[in-house]
């Protein structure tokens, strides 16, 4: 009835929470104070809108540019590593439309289930982690990015994830306290966020 969990990120803490509810005595072991790490770096975004897998057509070219930019979301420290090369090859093999279409339903179900669990945690936990469902704006500045985001919105709507394409003026109405300089945005009203710490 005793379980040790290594790592106090969202996976470790969630596992500990549900195991404790099931009657287990749980000890979490972590190198830090649990206020930093991947969960913190993810900015507390709960995004059922993100149903398109990273391995998608067009990502190879972007990925190669991003891999060598240490400030990009896809930075990989260059090194000769068999596992990294194997991963890169698998990513390349899966960056196709067939894989994307097969992955979308699973990613959608997982994301909606995850959001439902956060909604329940917001009701059950004895502390406030600032869970809020205010949606997500994917702003864009260029016609190329506008086209990409519009395609994403179409895919989302086709799979039951509400997405709205907004003009600059419509974005400004949603964000009256800041000057909007974006060309426009796609708004996903079903997305949420929280304070990960």
Image (cartoon, rainbow, N blue to C red):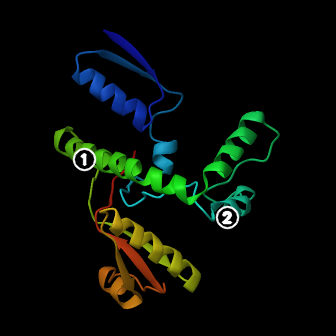
Residue 170, by quadrant, is bottom left
Residue at x-position 79% and y-position 47%: 78
Q: Nearer the viewer, residue 188 or 15?
A: 188
Pick out the residue farthest to the top. 1
What residue sits right under mark 2 in the picture?
Answer: 62
Secondary element at tag 1: helix
The answer to whether 108 is drawn above or below residue 29 in the figure is: below
Pick out the residue farthest to the left. 123
The location of residue 53, given as percent across then percent down, is 51, 54
Q: Say few, some or many: other residues with alpha carbon within 10 Å of mark 2 (under 14 / 14 to 19 / 20 or more).
A: few
Pick out the residue farthest to the front. 98
Residue at x-position 34% and y-position 80%: 175
Pick out the residue farthest to the right. 80
Residue at x-position 29% and y-position 45%: 113
**Residue 29 visible, this angle:** yes
Residue at x-position 38% and y-position 52%: 105
Secondary element at tag 2: helix
The answer to whether 183 is drawn above or below residue 64 in the figure is: below
What residue sits right under mark 1 in the picture?
Answer: 116
* C-alpha distance separating marks 1 and 2: 32 Å
Give the mark nearest the N terminus, 1 or 2: 2
Q: Are marks 1 and 2 in contact (CB under 8 Å)?
A: no
The answer to whether 74 is drawn above or below residue 141 in the figure is: above
Q: Is residue 76 left or right of residue 40?
A: right
The location of residue 145, given as percent across then percent down, is 55, 78
The quarter of the picture where the N terminus appears is top left
């Amino acid at each position: 009835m005793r379980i040790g969990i290594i790592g106090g990120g969202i996976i470790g803490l969630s596992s500990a929470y549900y195991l404790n509810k099931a009657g287990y005595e749980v000890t979490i072991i972590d190198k830090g104070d649990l206020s930093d790490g991947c969960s913190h770096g993810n900015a507390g975004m709960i995004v059922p809108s993100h149903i398109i897998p990273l391995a998608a057509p067009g990502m190879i070219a972007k990925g190669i540019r991003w891999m060598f930019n240490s400030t990009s979301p896809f930075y990989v420290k260059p090194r000769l590593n068999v596992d990294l090369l194997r991963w890169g090859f698998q990513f390349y093999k899966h960056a196709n439309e067939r894989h994307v279409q097969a992955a979308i339903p699973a990613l959608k179900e997982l994301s909606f289930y995850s959001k439902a669990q956060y909604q329940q945690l917001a009701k059950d936990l004895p502390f406030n982690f600032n869970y809020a469902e205010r949606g997500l704006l994917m702003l864009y500045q260029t016609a190329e990015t506008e086209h990409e985001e519009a395609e994403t919105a179409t895919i989302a709507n086709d799979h039951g994830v509400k997405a709205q394409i907004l003009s600059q003026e419509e974005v400004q109405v949603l964000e009256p306290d800041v000057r909007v300089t974006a060309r426009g945005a796609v708004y996903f009203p079903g997305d949420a966020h929280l304070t990960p710490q």
